[in-house]
Image: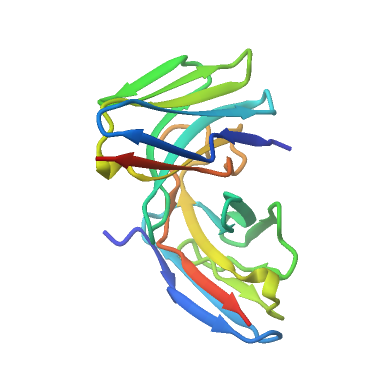
Amino acid sequence: NAGVTQTPKFRILKIGQSMTLQCAQDMNHNYMYWYRQDPGMGLKLIYYSVGAGITDKGEVPNGYNVSRSTTEDFPLRLELAAPSQTSVYFCASSYPPSGGPNTEAFFGQGTRLTVV
Amino acid sequence: GENVEQHPSTLSVQEGDSAVIKCTYSDSASNYFPWYKQELGKGPQLIIDIRSNVGEKKDQRIAVTLNKTAKHFSLHITETQPEDSAVYFCAASPHGAPLVFGKGTRLSVIA
């Protein structure tokens, strides 16, 4: 059982370049999330989705875009990479949302992104 | 919105001793409080959670307590072992909203 799969695991970008971080889950979860993790700062929510075709901003959405065309996939797009976007990015999924039964959020292994 | 504070940021204990990590939250509507463990190079993994209708929950050496009046909850690890060394995150969620995380506690268990 693969769970939540993120690709790539590592990436170095130059300032101004763009890239897409891929996230796929095989648990048929409705809810998916993107967090970024900076040293000593915990995990901050970038975007989330409650189902295919529905996305919403989190705490730190600036500089990112997302789409959710299928239940399984939730890619995160960086259009103009900036040094401030150097971070570790985690994708997660859950069903149903936190607060209800069976609400564990499953995380991927992360993507370490460096912008130089 | 919800704000979660976590203390301490680092914690060192001798093997076999207990470890306690504390969190406070701001939104009285929060009703779900999970704890995640993150090992080096991996994603966070749920170790225990508690809901607002319960004051305490235990799973072997791990326990969590919740005080809704004071808006704080704590993780207790007894008989610590070297494999407990990791970063621990608390989180809170008000009624289906995405999890809001604390800043994490780096626990080191010294053999």
| Quarter of the N terminus of chain A within the rendering | bottom left
Q: Is residue B27 left or right of residue A110?
A: right
Asked if residue A103 shows in the view, the reply is no
The residue nearer to you, when weighing B10 against A63, is B10
| Residue located 51% across and 19% down the image | B66
Q: Residue at x 61, y 51 (%)?
A: A41
Can residue A105 be seen here? The reply is yes
Q: Residue B23: x percent and y percent?
A: 56, 29
Q: How many marks?
A: 0
Q: Position of residue B9 (x, y in %)?
A: 54, 40
Identify the coloring: rainbow
The answer to whether B61 is drawn above or below residue B69 in the figure is below
Image x and y of residue B107, in percent: 41, 41
Q: Does residue A10 sit above or below B74 in this rendering?
A: below
Q: Nearer the viewer, residue B94 or B23?
A: B23
Say above or below: B84 vs A54: above
Q: Nearer the viewer, residue A59 or B88?
A: B88
Quarter occupied by residue A110:
bottom left
Left or right position of A20 against A7 = right
Closer to the camera, B68 or A95? B68
Taking the spot 46% from the left edge, 76% from the top edge, the residue there is A10
Say which quadrant the C terminus of chain A sits in. Answer: bottom right
Residue at position x 53%, y 30% from top? B32
Quadrant position of residue B96? top right
Q: Is residue B22 above or below residue A98?
A: above
Estimate the x, y position of residue A94 in percent, counting from the top left: 46, 47
